[in-house]
Image (tube, grey):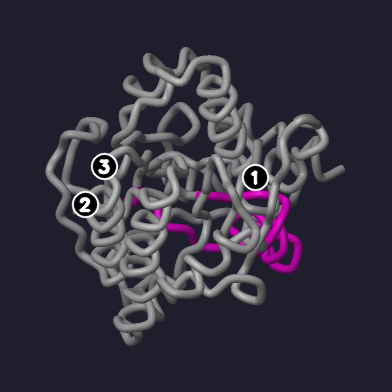
Amino acid sequence: MKILVTGSNGQLGSELKSRVKEFKSWKFVFTDVEELDITSAEAIETYIKKKGPFNYLVNCAAYTAVDKAEDEFEKASLLNAYAPGYLAKACKNHDIKLIHISTDYVFEGKNHTPYTENDETSPNSVYGKTKLNGELQVLMNNSESIVLRTSWLYSRFGHNFVKVMQKIGSERNKISVVFDQIGTPTHAYDLADIILTIISQTEEKKSNWKSGIYHFSNEGVCSWYDFAIEIMKLWNIDCDVEPITSDMYPQKAPRPFYSVMNKAKIKQNYSIKISHWKDALLKYKNLTE
């Protein structure tokens, strides 16, 4: 059984790499832009024919520079929209099951209750628009795909909010963090875990593969301010965290003010329990020490 992972140098791809020893009978092939240019349909076809056959493809690749995307629509579109469509088409041609990673930014963020997979999408940033287009391209080219939306991703690999807070919290006596953007952090280790669970359950019984859109983050709800407070507390960092509103910290791309996602569908279809975000953060701490 063979799994192709694209965008494997990022946070999620790196977490998947760290888990391969647990699945000795599975063969993983990890690629990033150096090995495979997913913005070229021809390159994807050539690679699959040369290195395949593959049973699964996990697309972790994305243009994630949210503010920069406002000035780089074409670049963001190529990686977030067109490339997933090319991958989906190739997966259909070669009978490969595709898991594509998307984002909470596909929502406008004006809800007051957790978003379900059936709620209307209305992104208000270039990043969100290109990621939504990617979802549409995936499902249009291969309706048997799985799209996993996630939010506020962090891990021991790469650049993320947890590492930034640890660094600046250790360097300053006081920092300001927005308290009017509400969502849920996601430990990339747990996101990798659900991907591996979906594949495991499908290998046990093919009918366990249930295509469509799913939401996955850790459990619970918080603001970025709450998240920062918990980071300071867990790492015993003596830094005062001041709550501010988003207009006091202007950013080029608008963020969803509320992007909590309802995870009932994935819990039901794959019989999983999801850790609370505070427990997931503690797990992250233990993994990094």
Q: Give how far across and how far down residue 230 sits, in percent.
A: 61, 40
* Foreground of the two, 253 or 142: 142
Residue appearing at x 50%, y 54% in the figure:
59
User: To which residue does mark 2 refer?
Assistant: 140
**Does the image show residue 174?**
no
Disc on the earlier residue, 1 or 2? 2
Q: Are there few (<14), some (14-19), or many (20+) residues within 10 Å of tag 1? A: many
Residue appearing at x 50%, y 42% in the figure:
185
> What are the residue bounds of the magenta stretch?
153-181
Q: Amino acid at mark 3?
A: Ser
Q: Are there few (<14), some (14-19), or many (20+) residues within 10 Å of tag 2? A: some
**Does the image show residue 215?**
yes
* Foreground of the two, 239 or 83: 83
User: To which residue does mark 3 refer?
Assistant: 143
Compared across the picture, whether 134 is left or right of 169 comes to left
Q: Is residue 157 magenta?
A: yes
Q: Are there few (<14), some (14-19), or many (20+) residues within 10 Å of tag 3? A: some
Q: Give how far across and how far down residue 42 sits, in percent.
A: 44, 74
Residue appearing at x 62%, y 32% in the figure:
280
User: To which residue does mark 1 refer?
Assistant: 231
Q: Nearer the viewer, mark 1 or mark 3?
A: 3
Vertical comparison of 253 with 153: above or below: below
